[in-house]
């Protein structure tokens, strides 16, 4: 397994932006598709974005499409989630997830093929 640490969360007004980072250690993230999930208070964890090992393929939940961008820097063993035009309904704990070797973006969107989770970072969007 890889150890994942998220950072970059915080309090922001609606319409603002934040960039989350997820740094990995223990093995190279370049071997893995990666994803972001989130869990709002009282709700189940939901898929947000995923990215292939090369960064050439991405997928987004409909609720964030056009506002969020997932990217990665394999040399830094880090992935990112740029969040723009934030809405109060984006308030949640955001989790980074690493796929097992061979996992693809499609399976990651369904929460399958994941072998490591970070502990999460809280994003609060005020209205």
Image: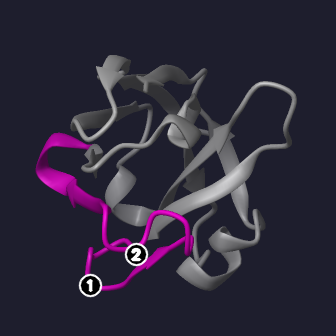
Quick check: 95 above or below 64? above
At 26% from the left and 84% from the top, the residue drawn is 56
Quick check: 57 above or below 31? below
Q: CA distance from mark 2 to mark 1?
A: 6 Å
Residue 94 is inside the magenta segment: no
Q: Can residue 48 be seen at all in this image of the molecule?
A: yes
Q: Nearer the viewer, residue 87 or 119?
A: 87
Give the percent coordinates (x, y) of residue 30.
32, 61
Quick check: 89 above or below 121? below
Q: Are marks 2 and 1 in contact (CB under 8 Å)?
A: yes
At 30% from the left and 21% from the top, the residue drawn is 12
Which secondary structure, mark 1? loop
Give the percent coordinates (x, y) of residue 26.
44, 32
Which secondary structure, mark 2? loop
Give the percent coordinates (x, y) of residue 73.
16, 54
Q: Nearer the viewer, residue 26 or 35?
A: 35
Magenta stretch in the rendered image: 52-77
Give the percent coordinates (x, y) of residue 103.
61, 75
At 58% from the left and 41% from the top, the residue drawn is 89
Q: Quadrant of the C terminus?
A: top left
Label 1 sits on residue: 56
Q: Can residue 33 be seen at all in this image of the molecule?
A: no
At 37% from the left and 52% from the top, the residue drawn is 29
Label 2 sits on residue: 52
Query: Within 10 angstroms of label 2, few (less than 14), some, or many (20 or more) residues?
Result: many
Query: Within 10 angstroms of label 1, few (less than 14), some, or many (20 or more) residues?
Result: few
Quick check: 68 above or below 109? above
């Amino acid at each position: 397994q890889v150890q994942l640490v998220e950072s970059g969360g915080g309090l922001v007004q609606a319409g603002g932006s934040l960039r989350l980072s997820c740094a990995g250690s223990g093995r190279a993230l370049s071997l893995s598709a990666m994803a972001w999930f989130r869990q709002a208070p009282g709700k189940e964890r939901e898929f947000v974005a995923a990215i292939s090992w090369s960064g050439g393929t991405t997928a987004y939940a409909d609720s964030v499409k056009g506002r969020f961008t997932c990217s990665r820097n394999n040399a830094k063993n880090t992935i990112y989630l740029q969040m723009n035009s934030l809405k109060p309904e984006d308030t949640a704990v955001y989790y980074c997830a690493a796929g097992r070797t061979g996992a693809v973006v499609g399976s990651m969107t369904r929460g399958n093929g994941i072998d490591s989770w970070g502990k999460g970072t809280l994003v609060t969007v005020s209205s």
